[in-house]
């Protein structure tokens, strides 16, 4: 099925992914590519509309941050956001200058000109009847002269041209950021652009996507066999379910248990995939190996590298046994020796690709590396299968539910790849991990069982990420008639829409009281429970 597409050109903004997420939420397919793609690429992409992102740069600096000429020749609507507005203004004959008053944060924007983009969209109106929008600004420059053919679309007292439009050509630009949640009508504005102005059909729906994805997997794999590293996380689980839907027993999953999983998580993974889906799963207990290598290591980055490196090593060892030409492999829950795999499947999702600089770009900036975005297939001599590569996390969750995976599994809070290894501060030890997973299980159980009366939702659903942290310190306590000297744990629960910023969750005192009481009474070795009330920034969500 061919979908209508929106092309997002990235000029280096830290929130470009949020633009794509908002467009996808409007059920329109889009892709992010760098601003320096070729004219030929834009023509071949054949977008129904183009969005130009923000940037840290200024248009008058010596650089090449300009939209390709094909953007203006494509004959499709264009939306410029922040820097995207600046480059639109400069390239089409307007003027941009440094502002004597910078705007960062909340602002109220007055709409002008009754443009199609803002028609019927406002947060409130002034006594004079002017429509107003509550938005988020982040800029130090401003448009001082409109390009020929453009009219004023929005303004603030300090930014007289906060939006502009040439509706004859379908060009719109806003100084504020509609992609962030702080702009209250941002999703509505972006939806208006892609659905109303660009005319996209809104046919990007996960339930319908399964049929397309299954067909593509079958075409790519044929009668060959596939290996997948199953971590138990959402991405690898949904990838496994989707591939198994497509090719059944041609898929073999390898589940590496590093000893740093949540309570009973390994058994739950095996029950779901080997038990309920009847997929072939090899479970590798490598906990002694991981804990042995982590002994005495306290530096968080070293811990991450050790865990990540060992995981790859163990998986490579198992995958080598499954490769075509190596005689097959009989392991747990594998009913027969496979003839030999020629594909490696990975749960790579679209943010991984973007952050790793893998979006078909010439100058993509690598934000962080992901071991599942390159390298491993070549090392193993296998072809790569990435069925979730074009999906965002929320789309992956929707897909998982549509595939029949349990809601509680698909909508679990994020869990770091190193597992409890980065929720145990300092040295990782088995006794620490055992204490932590029991305490963490109690906290999660209480969150799941406590309903917030106004929303009718549990506090687990109302928090974006919640977990327990083990602190390698002891404090004095009293139990019965005796003095104790035991360990301390910290509870952490945050609320966020994008994980770039987060507020600590204001959990009910009664929930915290029950959780603390249960942990201290049920987990021998812990005598004190604290609650982390730090927001991000300045803190991070995880402690390491």
Image (cartoon, rainbow, N blue to C red):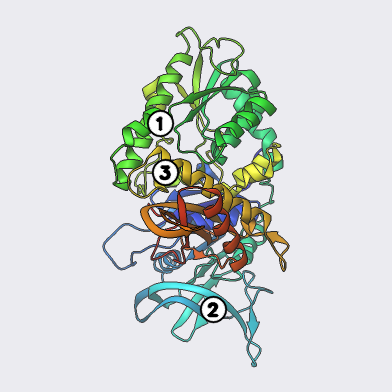
Residue 154: assigned label: 2
Q: Position of residue 61 (x, y in %)?
A: 28, 66
Where is residue 427, by image quadrant? top left
Q: Position of residue 276 (x, y in %)?
A: 69, 28
Q: Position of residue 477 (x, y in %)?
A: 44, 59
- Sequence-wise, which precedes: disc 2 or disc 1? 2
Q: CA distance from mark 1 to mark 3?
A: 21 Å
Q: Residues within 10 Å of mark 3 (few under 14, many from 20)?
A: some
Please tell me whether mark 3 sits on a helix, a strand or a loop: helix
Vertical side of 154 occupied by 1: above or below: above
For the question of whether residue 360 can be seen, the reply is no
Choose mark 1 or mark 3, whichever is in front: 3
Q: Quadrant of the N terminus?
A: top right
Please tell me whether mark 2 sits on a helix, a strand or a loop: strand
- Sequence-wise, which precedes: disc 3 or disc 2? 2
Which residue does the numbered mark 3 point to in the structure image?
Answer: 432
- Sequence-wise, which precedes: disc 1 or disc 3? 1
For the question of whether residue 240 can be seen, the reply is yes
Vertical side of 107 occupied by 288: above or below: above
Q: Position of residue 448 (x, y in %)?
A: 65, 53
> What residue is shown at x 50% (from left), y 32% (from top)?
346
Which residue does the numbered mark 1 point to in the structure image?
Answer: 311
Left/right placement of residue 274 relative to residue 57 reads right
Vertical side of 395 occupied by 148: above or below: below
Left/right placement of residue 323 relative to residue 495 reads left
């Amino acid at each position: 099925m061919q979908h209508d597409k929106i092309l997002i050109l990235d000029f280096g903004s830290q929130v470009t992914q949020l633009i794509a997420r908002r467009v996808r939420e409007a059920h329109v397919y889009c892709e992010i590519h760098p601003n320096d793609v070729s004219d030929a690429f834009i023509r071949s992409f054949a977008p129904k509309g183009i969005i130009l992102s923000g940037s840290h740069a200024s248009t008058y600096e010596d650089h090449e941050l300009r939209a390709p000429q094909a953007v203006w020749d494509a004959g499709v609507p264009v939306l410029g956001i922040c820097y995207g507005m600046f480059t639109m203004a400069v390239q089409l004959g307007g003027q941009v200058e440094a502002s004597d008053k910078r705007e960062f944060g909340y602002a109220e924007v007055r709409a002008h000109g009754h443009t199609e983009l803002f028609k019927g969209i406002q947060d409130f109106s002034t006594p004079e009847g002017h429509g107003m929008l509550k938005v988020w600004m982040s800029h130090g420059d401003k448009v001082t002269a409109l390009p020929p053919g453009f009219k004023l679309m929005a303004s603030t007292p300090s930014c007289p041209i906060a939006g502009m439009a040439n509706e004859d050509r379908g060009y719109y630009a806003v100084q504020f950021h509609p992609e962030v949640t702080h702009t209250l009508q941002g999703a509505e504005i972006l939806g208006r652009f892609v659905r109303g102005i660009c005319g996209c059909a809104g046919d990007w729906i996960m339930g319908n996507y399964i049929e397309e994805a299954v067909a593509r997997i079958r075409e790519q794999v044929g009668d060959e066999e596939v290996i997948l590293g199953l971590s138990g996380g959402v991405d690898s689980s949904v990838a496994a379910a989707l591939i198994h839907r497509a090719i059944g027993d041609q898929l073999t999953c390898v589940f590496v248990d590093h000893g740093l999983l949540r309570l009973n998580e390994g058994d739950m993974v095996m029950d779901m995939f080997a038990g309920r889906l009847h997929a072939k799963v090899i479970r590798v207990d490598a906990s002694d190996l991981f804990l042995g290598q982590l002994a005495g290591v306290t530096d968080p980055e070293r811990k991450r590298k050790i865990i990540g490196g060992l995981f790859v090593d163990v998986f490579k060892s198992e995958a080598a046994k499954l490769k075509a030409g190596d005689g097959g492999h009989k392991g747990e829950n594998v009913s027969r020796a496979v003839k030999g795999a020629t594909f490696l499947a990975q749960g790579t999702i679209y943010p991984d690709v973007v952050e790793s600089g893998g979006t078909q770009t010439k100058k993509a900036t690598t934000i962080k590396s992901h071991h599942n975005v390159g390298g491993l297939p070549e090392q193993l001599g296998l072809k790569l299968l990435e069925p979730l590569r074009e999906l965002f996390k929320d789309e992956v969750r929707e897909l998982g539910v549509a595939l029949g995976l349990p809601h509680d599994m698909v909508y679990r809070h994020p869990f770091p790849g190193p597992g409890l290894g980065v929720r145990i501060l300092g040295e990782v030890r088995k006794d620490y991990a055992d204490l932590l997973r029991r305490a963490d299980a109690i906290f999660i159980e209480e969150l799941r069982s406590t309903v917030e009366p106004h929303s009718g939702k549990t506090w687990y659903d109302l928090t974006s990420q919640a977990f327990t942290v083990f602190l390698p310190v002891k404090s004095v306590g009293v139990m019965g008639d005796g003095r104790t000297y035991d360990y301390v744990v910290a509870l952490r629960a945050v609320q966020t829409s994008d994980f770039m910023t987060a507020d600590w969750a204001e959990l009910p005192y009664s929930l915290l009281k029950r959780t603390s009481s249960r942990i201290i009474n049920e987990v021998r070795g812990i005598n004190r429970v604290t609650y982390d009330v730090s927001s991000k920034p300045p803190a991070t969500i995880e402690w390491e």
